[in-house]
Image (cartoon, rainbow, N blue to C red):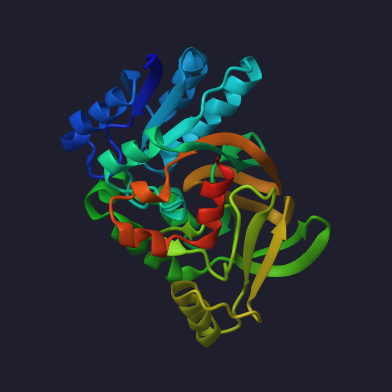
Amino acid sequence: MSQKNMIFIVNPKAGKNQLKTKMVEVVDEFSRAGYHVEVYTTKSAEDAEQHIYDVGDLHDLIVISGGDGSMDNAVTGIMRLKEKTDKVPPLGYIPCGSTNDYAKSLCISLKPEIAARQIVKGHPCPVDIGRLGDHHFIYVAAFGLFTKASYDTPRKMKAVLGHGAYMISAAKELTSVKTYRLKASFDGRIITGEFIYGQVTNSRSVGGFRAVGLRDMSFHDGEFECVFIRKPKNPVELERILQAVVTNKPVEDYIVYERAKTVKVEGITEIPWTVDGEYAGDIKQARVDNLHNEVTLMLGDLTTYGDPKTENLVPASVKKAHLLSR
């Protein structure tokens, strides 16, 4: 077996540091698959991006361990690397964050040693990513209700409480729901009005919840799934909207669903946006583009999930992604 080179980038501050006790097993999994493993621990929030840009083309595989923010930063590094060279390796993901939306969407194991096995026994699968202005993102761009909680929640609180930390911070927003008067275009189809929330996503899970109203989706069809929630007229309507979000039972009077390659949002005032849960700035005229099959992920066979029963729980869209990766 010829030896291959891997750069294993680890965010030591992500989640509850669940990788720490499994590091030997993970590296052993990689080594037994024929990889020479170089471990690199990040020193700052943007460190993965820069390291991938600096040395990514010298390796056969890049693996990132961390939360959704770490994955986002790795994808940004991949995009920068593509501007420099044609030799861009595929990306593997070992989720170790508080919410892990994207990993859950693709049924990547939350057990580090199994996630490592999925990577080395997997197949390259091209996936869509998004671009909001100068920001690239892997699974969601959003504004409005609950999005502020994702970047205002202290990192220590996220590490200790996990998903509950987001809920505590988000609950504070319910006392003063902010609305945004805007015009949105989905490949030319226009809606107007006042909205409390909007998301443009390529994921089955956002903020730890199943993406509301999502029945079927693809990770590489060149389109986003979009959800925009209108301003409720009274507390009863707000309660119905929140119930729809929690139970994933859409209420079409209040919630707009669209699929689109390009989404444009023009506000009367600037609107604060997040990408993959991180603050992306206040933007008056936002344009979100789907970059079709722009990043290649290593996705494992459904038989590597550690539990045969798991295969029955995998969404059809994920099974299709795995099949197309061959």
Residue at coordinates 43% horizontally, 34% vertically from top-left?
A: 92
Q: Position of residue 58 (x, y in %)?
A: 48, 12
Please give the name of the residue rendered at 69% of the width and 52% of the height, measured from the top-left corner. 223
Q: In percent of the image, x 33 and y 36: which residue is there? A: 116
Side (left or right) of 46 relative to 128: left
Residue found farthest to the bottom: 236
149 and 68: which is toward the camera: 68
Q: Is residue 230 above or below residue 132?
A: below
Q: Residue furthest front?
A: 1
User: Which of the 4 quarters of the picture holds residue 188?
Assistant: bottom right
Between 6 and 265, the one nearer to me in the picture? 6
Above or below, 298 against 263 in this view is above
The picture quadrant where one finds residue 1 is: top left
- Return the x and y of residue 299 as percentages of the image width and height: 46, 41
In the picture, measured across the screen, residue 286 lies left or right of residue 165, that is right
The relative height of residue 157 versus residue 82 in the rendered view (above or below) is below
How many numbered discs sit on the rendered protein? 0
Extreme-right residue of the structure: 188
Q: Is residue 87 left or right of residue 59?
A: right
Quadrant in which the C terminus is drawn: top right
- Residue shown at the point (39%, 21%) measured from the top left: 7
Asked if residue 249 is positioned above or below residue 273 in the image, the reply reads below
Q: Position of residue 322 (x, y in %)?
A: 51, 47
Coordinates of residue 80 in the picture (x, y in percent): 59, 23
